[in-house]
Amino acid sequence: MFRSMFKKTYTKINDAGEKHIKSGVPEGMWRKCAKCLSPVYAEGVRNNYYICPKCGGYFRVHAYRRIEMICDKGSFEEWNKVMPVSNPLQFPGYEEKIAEAKLKSKLDEAVVTGKACIDGIPVVIAACDARFLMSSMGHNVGEKITYALERAADEKLPVIIYSCSGGARMQEGIVSLMQMAKTSAAVKKLHEAGQLYISFLTDPTTGGVTASFAMLGDIILAEPKALIGFAGPRVIAQTIGTKLPEGFQRAEFLLEHGFVDAIVERKDQKAVLGNILKTFKNRERCSKAAGTVKCNESSIKDKSFIPDYSPGFSSKKGKSGDNLADYLRKDKAAYTQKAASYGHNDIKDGLVAGKLKKINEIVRIRSGKVRSDKSAWESVLISRKKDRLTAKDYIDEMFSDFFELHGDRYFADDKAIIGGTAFFNKKPVMVIGQQKGKNLKENKLRNFGMPSPEGYRKVIRLMKLAEAFKLPVICFVDTPGAFCGIEAEERGQGEAIARCLYEAGDLKTPVLSIVIGEGGSGGALAMAVANEVWMLEHAIYSILSPEGFASILYKDAAKCKEAAQDMRITSADLLNLGIIEKIIPEKKPVCMDNIDEIISYLGFELEKWINKYSIISKEELVKQRYERYRKF
């Protein structure tokens, strides 16, 4: 009796077809979520972008379905659908395994490649499929990826690759390893052809695929919670003999550590890809189309905009306030014509006169020099006010379709630096800013606007990306200085700032820097090597904080007010010294209450600046920037 209690028993399980017939449930109606193990309604999963409705876990998506989800209907044209079997090592049983994988997946190989359109924009696309030998990379996978990249370079098309792989294909040995070098070289060829490469990492992306084409994208996106890494987590845990932290090697982990630009949910992927493609498509075509767009009423929130006349702000011509007014009155006809061309066709003489008066009031020129009605120390305090507009405020108000890019691709994503692609009046640009918080919690997150080495390396990455695709760079400078700490020195703070100066000086695209708050020392200069530097009226730009300056030279930090005056750190001082080209007037210190006024003015000026520099050659841009700093 007791013996039978421990006897193994076996129950015959009918095949799926019989089971469904007997239960009355159609085959394929239900699926089991691999994450929460719950049964889920298959149709509901399909309608929910293949996401579990119970736990939010992502099901793996087949290659053709992936292409169907993100490409315009009927636009996909497949390349290299059938390829001869490759077994370079004559590995026993490998060809039979390939035959089984083909039968199971209904694919010829682990990746599908071809040409399609997303929002009408032609693109080369590749999608890996984990059903085929875990989408491991052998000769045929490497060949299909390489051919797609080469053809994209020849046809001047952007590339999107959805990666999903267990790594190299073991049965092909060293030949599989060579695919890493081959595909990476093809990515380089695409880059040299000036074409965009978007790498989209899905679960899992590991091994040789991670260590080659998957991590070489100009922009790297990932699906939520995707496993991404070189070595597998079990191998790492066994090697170091330690339990791995929660979330290790997941997409969120890579975002935090600077290797992924953004995590994008499936429902948003087509829209996000379409927006990125529009931003980076052929710059010449885009510039030509954008050149016909005027700075009209819809692009300027405050219709009582204030045009700028450079002679009014320049001390070099020695114009007094009266001379400036005379200059503007003589130029009234030109101003009226210019204003009308920007969409203000109802300009009247009275409106022009009002603008002249407002300009005279703002410029405040006395005896041929620009002066402010605030003391230097008052400007210091204003520049540090908690309610002062931050870089993100300007980005949100002045630009459309901003897509933030994260990380330095080396160590981390520094939240003291915010940057990404955007449109200004339908013209694609790269915007980068030093970001402070508006309360203690935000300031802790943003490190009080003090960038670390990884922040400056992110700046370099975004600038080089802008250069590659001919996007103007607009920087918003607002920092008390670069972060000083043990970890910053360990990671090379000085080298990171030096590298910023080095790369920005030779950047072959227009660069504009606007000091909107504090411009503290080398930490600010790292983002102010530009063709032009502007300052808000009550911003400051200095070698050191007044408190630090007073401590060092006057041996008394309490003499900071005197130091601020002696340092010549205000916008008026710096314009007279030739350090900056333009002052953005603040009738009142900028804050959210008067944001429309400052955005209107800046928008008008930025439109003129982009038009001015868009017709200058790369060589002249670099030469002008070099000579700008050579004169000091």
Image: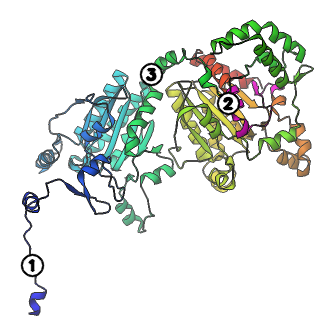
Of circles 2 and 1, which is in front? Answer: 2
Q: Say whether residue 230 is left or right of residue 280.
A: left
Q: 617 or 13, which is in the foreground?
A: 13
Assign a secondary structure to mark 2: helix
The kind of residue on which mark 1 rests is Thr
- Membership of 286 in magenta stretch: no
Visible residue check, residue 555: no
Visible residue check, residue 341: yes
Q: Quadrant of residue 360?
A: top right
The kind of residue on which mark 3 rests is Asn
Q: Say whether residue 403 is left or right of residue 140.
A: right
Seen at 28% across and 63% down, the residue is: 37
Position above or below: 531 against 568: above
For marks 2 and 3 on the same chain, the one whose residue lies earlier in the sequence: 3
- Membership of 581 in magenta stretch: yes
For marks 3 and 1 on the same chain, the one whose residue lies earlier in the sequence: 1
Range drawn in magenta: 575-601
Q: Sort mark 3 into few (<14), some (14-19) or many (20+) by Cα contacts within 10 Å.
A: some
Position above or below: 303 against 4: above
Residue to which mark 1 is pinned:
9
Assign a secondary structure to mark 3: loop
Residue to which mark 3 is pinned:
282
- CA gap between label 3 and label 1 equals 68 Å
Q: Sort mark 1 into few (<14), some (14-19) or many (20+) by Cα contacts within 10 Å.
A: few
Residue to which mark 2 is pinned:
599
